[in-house]
Amino acid sequence: MHRLVLASVVLFAATSAQSQSAGRPTPPAPRSSPSATLPVQRAPQAAPRARNLRAPQIQTAPSAPASLTPAARAQAVQQLMNTPTPPAPGATIHLAVSAPIGTDGASLAYQAPRQIWTAANIAFFDIGVPDSYLWIMPPTWPAGLKLFDCAVTSAGGDTFDWSAGSGAVWVGGQAPVVDGHVTFVAATTPAQSVMLSATGAAGLWTVRWCDITRLGA
């Protein structure tokens, strides 16, 4: 009688939310079929930075839910960075659940999603589950600041944790949900990626799309 050997993979949840020097998982490669759960290790959340706790008073485009208008992007950057002369928004790449692979190597991927509903352009994640989060792979633009804007809903949590980096160096913060958008500014290189997850005890959060906008020259 044949014996069936089951191999199990244990996902480790990091316990320190303050450490920014601990190793982070390598993000999964972009997939044309994003419905599969990606077996990567859960990374510890990076310590929040106070400047990203500001809630930008952004205005959505007329055909909401939709990408921000150029003026709304500029306003979000101004409020997030809180500087007199913030870098001007430049080119934007749009990534959707129904089309997760964009130009210049940008893509979305999913770690332990509850459900991926490609036809409806929506992905569901669990709040409070350490291994449930969204990967955002930035484009192969030069290193520098980028505005990340994701269309989300959240039942059970109104704040999102984000972290950007690679290897042993990651930085991050928190961003609130404002008018169905989570926006934050992060400095990335072509080799780095971004993780996004909702905070809270329980519930579901969803994402439909994320825009990545290059800031400055």
Image (spheres, rainbow, N blue to C red):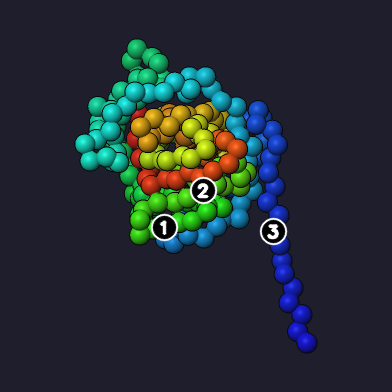
Which dot marks residue 9? Answer: 3
Q: In the image, what residue type sits under mark 3?
A: Val
Q: Mark 1 or mark 3, which is nearer to you?
A: 1
Q: Which residue is mark 1?
A: 117
Q: Is residue 89 left or right of residue 5?
A: left
The reply to whether dot 2 and dot 1 touch (C-beta < 8 Å) is no
The residues bearing labels 2 and 1 have C-alpha atoms spaced at a distance of 12 Å
Q: Mark 2 or mark 3, which is nearer to you?
A: 2
How many neighbours does mark 1 have within 10 angstroms: few (below 14), some (14-19), or many (20 or more)? Answer: some
Label 2: state its secondary structure. strand
Query: What residue is drawn where x is 44% and y is 20%?
Result: 54
Residue 105 in sight from this viewpoint = no
The residues bearing labels 2 and 3 have C-alpha atoms spaced at a distance of 20 Å
Rendered location of residue 66, percent (x, y): 28, 41
Query: What residue is drawn where x is 51% and y is 45%?
Result: 204
| Up/down of 150 relative to 109, above or below | above
Q: Nearer the viewer, residue 197 or 202?
A: 202
Q: Residue 2 appears in which quarter of the rendering?
A: bottom right
The residue positioned farthest toward the top in the image shown: 84
The residue positioned farthest toward the bottom in the image shown: 1
The residues bearing labels 1 and 3 have C-alpha atoms spaced at a distance of 26 Å
Q: In the image, what residue type sits under mark 1?
A: Trp
First of labels 2, 3 by sequence position: 3
Q: Quadrant of the N terminus?
A: bottom right
Which dot marks residue 125? Answer: 2
Label 3: state its secondary structure. loop
Query: What residue is drawn where x is 35% and y is 32%?
Result: 179
